Amino acid sequence: MITTRSVRLAGLLRGIFGALMTGSLMIEGDNLCAAPIELGSATDFAVLAGSGITISGAINSTVINGDIGSAPTFSITGLENAVFVTGVNHGGNAVTVSAKASLLTAYNNAAGQTATVTYTPITDLGGQTLFAGVHFNSSSFDITGMLTLDALGDPNAVWIFQMGSTLTTASNSLVNLINGALASNVFWQVGSSATLGSDSDFAGSILAFTSITVNDGASVQGRLLALNGAVTLLNNTIVVVRAPAVVDSVEFDGGGTVVVTDTLVVASGIFDVASGTGNVSGGTVITPGDLHKVGAGELVTDSFIDVGGTAYVDEGALYVNGTLKASAVNVLPNALLGGTGLIIGDVHNAGTVAPGDHGVGTFTIDGDYTQTPQGTLQIEISGDSSFDQLIVTGTASLSGTLDVLSLGNYSFEYGQQYPFLVAGNIIGSFDEILMPNSDLYRGRFIIEDNVGILLVAPASYTLVAETPNQTRVAIALDEWIGVEDGDIGEVTLALDVLTTDQYEAAFEAIMPSYYASAISTGIELSQTQGQLLSQQLGSRRLGNRRRNQAQNEAPAEQGEIEQAGGKGARSVQPSGGKNARRVQYAEQPILLAPGPLEDETRWNVWMQGTGMFSEGGMSLTPGESFESGEFMIGADYALSQHLSIGLFTSYQEGWGDYDNGGSIDLETVRLGAYATVDFEGFYAHGAAGYGQTDYSIHRPIQWATLDRTATSNPDGSEVFFMLGTGYDFHAGNFTFGPAASIQYTRLKLNGFTERGADSLNLQVDDTTAESLRTYIGGRVAYACVINEGLTLVPELRMFWQHEFMQGGDTIHSTLDSGNGPGFDYLTEEQGSDSLYAGAGVSMLLGSNVTISLYYHANIGRNDDTQHLVTAGLNWKF
């Protein structure tokens, strides 16, 4: 055993303790502890037998790190099932014979030691913690569960177990070495045979008088040495451990490298790297007590480091690319722990933990990870699937900062997710996430099934808004950035997982576009009613004039004829004798002049039923399918031959269905008055009215993980004014001429609050919209006389519509039922021009009743066509 006070590195030197170093090596002091039992030429043997070795199991299933041999009986079977990491198969050669002689000496040495602890026969050592010494049992030792050997910080502590008969370990048993205990200092002197249970984890060198059997899956840190019997293996791992070299501390002055070929004990546990990078590579490094990494430089190691106490990263950086085992690892402020290896023990981070060794890598902690508010976890990302990862087998308790670095020219995309933390359990979160290009990118930490994920989101939602309306919504949503709890947190998460091209749908789902559609639909229905009223008055006008024509063509008494016909009339003498009357016919039909106004025909009552259906013709909401039915009734009174006034009322229901299950249903009641003027070929009419509408609206809100429906029942009102005029020309039974009208509608949607969508419920303020629309066109009709009591009048109508005002109205909404941020939504300006065309027929029954049936189409309004079918009944009395 060589003991040194310190190792100082600057050149290149191999120490006799098996460490290759750069620099000068200073060795001071004396041997500080008793040497373990010397094995002589058997030291390098992992397996040594007297009557043969059998290796069972699958090919390459047993791993041996050391030499093997058997003498005097040379019989080794199953070599194809073994993998030799290091070592030589000596068979029964002279090296093996010499090793057997050394084994006999060592066996007798171990058996001859004076016992310090004596046990009763057949003692189970499982569950006990034993200190160094000679432990004697005249019979046998068993191990069930875990046996702990505690060196109390003394790397020279030696255990010798003496037994008169057998050593037996149970399946899954464990020999646990703590506080600097070394497998190279543990010896089991067995009076007969040893048997290691399946999947057991054993430490120490077995010196058996007879045989050794190692069952399936068991592993050994030490040696299997049988004096006389055989050694039997099955899918095992045997690693020879040798007595270590001992130094007080390791100091790197400006960098350097230590290559440990076996075991190095650093008594003080101090690794000092003043500057640059110090490397410790290979083998096993043991600190009996605490480990301290000091100095501003970096210590990089791929060794197995066994710390008897707590490991402290006091200064600089420690990169563990091998394994570091400690009761705990504390990273102090301004210090860094990183690497691609394994930490066995809990990690407490008040400095920086950075998986990877100056690049992307995976760092594993077999224990708990606790990050304080002062701590930072640093994650590097170089590709969509290339990023640092921290794996924690226990609980990860989070606080402090997550620092995200982008390597090379890698650029983030919104919605990308990086599962950088995998733990048995995750509690807490980071107080702050630092992102590169923070004016573009924002990081969000989410947990799914104990996997911590970095989600890349826009620094502002305005970065992914494409229209002014979307921008206004995005500005409002920016006020929720950073809220990750409750329903608002659920909403922001559903936003943050979106890719760039998915934000449009989310913004549109939040907007009050359904209420813009409700307003647009209300205006369209009001405008349509004005045109249907014009059509009702127009068809009645045609009927009245046809009746006037028939009346003017009828026979009249002489006096009446002379009065009506004047000198342009002609007399006809009908047959029938002297009692027959002379009749006279007008030379030309009088189609335009109204007939005599009789008291008994001053009243006119009418009714009209209308069905409408449209696929996108009422509004700009996607997927629209709208239907409505209306019943309108009116009555008017003729004040003179030229002027009539009347009243009307209507009831209308509408049903609109839209994409994703949205709907707008409505009920409207209207009251109004109208007047009509006829003077020869000229005519004019006007109407004014008021309407009240109740809506039932279901607004779907669907994107990413959200699927909600906001429900509301707003009400609204409307006023409208309509004025129309035209002139009819006549040619035979044809009537044709130009016509024009203008209609103004003002619709108000009263304020309301949605329900059913939690924080996405909108509180919508009072909203007013206006429409001013002109109709310029004409009509043509033909009177087809079937008989004296029946005349059919088919008619074609066609008008060009132009809208002057509709669109650009402001709907102000506030999120979270009025408790959240607000925004303005400007309704889209719809198509200004469209074609309103219709065809129908009026059926004149006698002199008092007219029945009409019409079809109209509003073509080019919004995205599709409105279709209307109307049936009317008119009765004069």
Image (tube, rainbow, N blue to C red):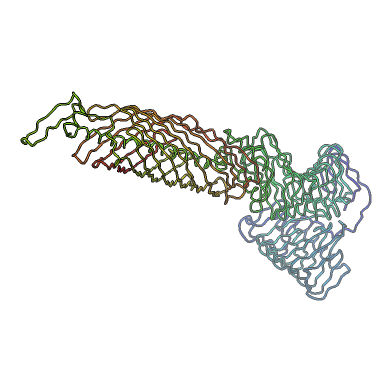
Q: Can residue 204 be seen in this view?
A: no
Look at the picture and state if 123 lies above or below 777. below
Asked if residue 461 is positioned above or below residue 655 in the image, the reply reads above
Q: Which residue lies furthest to the top in this view?
A: 567
Image coordinates of residue 203 in percent, x first then y, are 77, 61
583 on left or right of 656: left
Which residue occupies the extreme right position in the image?
Answer: 29
User: Where is residue 581 drawn, in percent x and y?
Assistant: 11, 35
- On the image, the x and y values in percent for residue 619 come to 47, 38
Horizontal side of residue 719 vs 449, given as left or right: left
Left or right side of 101 for 607: left
Q: How many marks?
A: 0
Which residue is nearer to you in this view: 780 or 119? 780
Q: Residue at x 54, y 49 (%)?
A: 711
Between residues 380 and 160, which one lies in front from this camera angle?
380
> How far across and how far down the image is residue 665, in percent?
47, 47
Position of the C terminus by quadrant = top left
Would residue 631 be visible to someone looking at this image? yes
The residue nearer to you, when weighing 852 against 833, is 852
Q: In the drawing, does residue 847 fall left or right of residue 73?
A: left
